Image: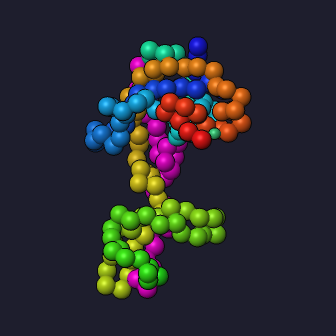
Amino acid sequence: MQIAERTVVSFHYTLTNDAGDVLDSSDGREPLAYLHGAGNIVPGLEREMSGHVAGDKFMVDVAAADGYGDYIEELVQTVPRESFQGVDDLAVGMQFQAQTGQGPIAVIITEIDEDEVTVDGNHPLAGETLHFAVEIIEVREASAEEVTHGHVHGAGGHHH
Ligand code: ZN
C-alpha cells in the first residue's frame, strides 16, 4: 500500500541538523505512527512521504519554513521577574503557556537575571534545516474514527 491521504504510516527516523548532530531519533523506541494528510508531522516531511511503501528508506531535507518555522526574534521577550511570582524554583528550560494576540503559545525560559526573565516562543528547532533519515515500517488504511479524530489510535498513537 502506498502512502496517501487516509493511510496510517509507521516509520523510524533519525533527525539531524546541518552540523550532523542528532536532534531526535526513534532508535530503540517504537516506530512513530501518524495519520497522513492530517498535519501530524512537519509539512516538508509529510509531503515527501507520499507514494512511499513499507521497506522504503530515504533521506528528506526540510527547510526551516517547512519544518518548525523560521526563527522569529520578536518571539524572544524579556519580562519582569515578578510575573513569575508563585512559581517555585524558576529555572532555565522551564516551559509556560503565554497569552498572546494570536492565542496561547508555549514559551521556554532561556535566561534568568535578578530582575528579568527572558522567554523564547520559538519552537526549539525553529530556524533549523532538518535532515530526516526515514525507514517506512508499515502503511495501513486509517479507520473512519482515526480520520474523524485526525490522529492515529493504538500502537504509536493515542489511547483513549
Ligand atoms: Zn482519537
Locate the N terminus and report the quarter of the image it occupies: top right
Instruction: Identify which residue is drawn at 35% across, 74% down.
Output: 90
Picture residue at 52% right of the left edge, 16% below the top: 53
Asked if residue 117 lies left or right of residue 19, the reply is right
Residue 133 percent location from the top left of the image:
38, 28
Q: Residue at x 52, y 40 (%)?
A: 42
In the rendered view of the protein, which quadrant contains the C terminus? top right
Q: Is residue 64 above or below residue 87?
A: above
The magenta stretch is 57-82
Tell me where residue 155 appears, x and y as whole percent: 50, 30
Residue 36 percent location from the top left of the image: 60, 30
- Residue 109 percent location from the top left of the image: 39, 68
Considering only vertical position in the picture, is 92 above or below 29? below
Which one is nearer the viewer's eye here, 112 or 147?
A: 147
Q: Nearer the viewer, residue 129 or 145?
A: 145
Q: Inspect this view and state whether residue 15 appears.
A: yes
Left or right of 135? Residue 44 is: right
Based on the displayed image, in which of its 4 quarters is residue 154 positioned? top right
Q: Per the image, is 58 magenta?
A: yes
Q: Indicate the quadrant where residue 57 lies.
A: top left
